[in-house]
Image (cartoon, rainbow, N blue to C red):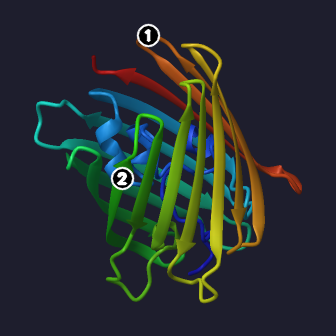
Amino acid sequence: MTSQPLLAQYFQGPQTMSLAGSGRGAEFGLETVHLNPATLVYAPQGDAALFYNFGKTPETGHNKETVAISALENNPDTFFSGSLNFVKQSFDFENRAKITEESWLLYGAKKFLNRWSLGLGFHHMRQNDYKYGIKNYFQSSVGVHYKFSQYLGVGLSYLNFLNSYDYEPNSIVPELGLGLTYFYQDMLRVQFDLVQITRGNPSKKLQYAMGIESFLNDYVSLRLGYRINNVLDKNTLHAGVGLNGPRLQIHYSYSQDPKKNKNAMHGVDLRVPFW
């Protein structure tokens, strides 16, 4: 029952994946909402995307495939910002049966006191473990974000904080994270996140996620990331590119265990703003 990788962060699109899973203090809410619900207030007014990830999870080598659809509403005239997401994932293992998961994730966020924002997330997952059967799980996440200036932001989140079951899949393990994001002259974004998994981690080991994004021009950005996972004693490299058209955006990411070239994960998305 513990064959799934202890990785948390239930879903990552190519933007956050290429930055090694950092972004709790960032301001691109369509993806970072899964890391910190409070970042939703900095998303575009209306946005939607289709995601597809495939390959081997770098930390464990398990085959994983993900399809996701996301949409958000962040109109300043609304009382709060909202995001609705559907995620379907499958895990293939060498020594046990396949696992598939279907999830609905709903997030809401609200600004307050000018520089602060607070977000809350609800997650319902239906897991089909072909060895142990079908089970349903409900989880929740909370986050807060503080914007020091247009160049500096910090976020704190607690993902999957409910302790409602004797057993929960490792894909929704509780996770406490702190993130810092800094913009340099609208040309460079640097991110650093500190993460602690609060279940199945008796030694309270930490994970570190570092990412850097360079905006070459208004249409192209390059990303690099590095993740130190002390829980699994694995380090991973991440890279990606973003093509930002006036009405259409495409992002790609590549993640790999540098010690095992065959353990690589790919991610791609297609985004269309509502207006």
Q: Quadrant of residue 136?
A: bottom left
Q: CA distance from mark 1 to mark 2?
A: 28 Å
Residue at image position (28%, 55%) is 119
Q: Which mark is residue 145?
A: 2
Disc 2, SS: strand
| Amino acid type assigned to the residue bearing label 2 in the image | His
Disc 1, SS: loop
Q: How many marks overall? A: 2
- Res. 68 visible in picture: no
- Could you say which is closer to the camera, residue 257 or residue 90? 257
- Res. 94 visible in picture: yes
| Amino acid type assigned to the residue bearing label 1 in the image | Pro
Residue at image position (44%, 75%) is 133
Say if 71 sits above or below 241 in the image.
below
Which residue matches tag 1?
Answer: 246
Residue at image position (44%, 78%) is 168
- Could you say which is closer to the camera, residue 196 or residue 273? 196
Q: Residues within 10 Å of mark 2 (few under 14, many from 20)?
A: many
> Which is in the foreground here, disc 1 or disc 2?
2
Residue 221 picture location, percent across and down: 62, 24
State which tag comes first along the sequence, 1 or 2: 2
Residue 153 as seen in the image, left or right of residue 72: right
Of all residues shown, which one is farthest toward the top? 246
Residue 80 picture location, percent across and down: 16, 44
Which corner quadrant holds the N terminus? bottom right
Residue 75 picture location, percent across and down: 19, 30
Q: Residues within 10 Å of mark 1 (few under 14, many from 20)?
A: few
Residue at image position (27%, 16%) is 275
Residue 16 picture location, percent across and down: 55, 43
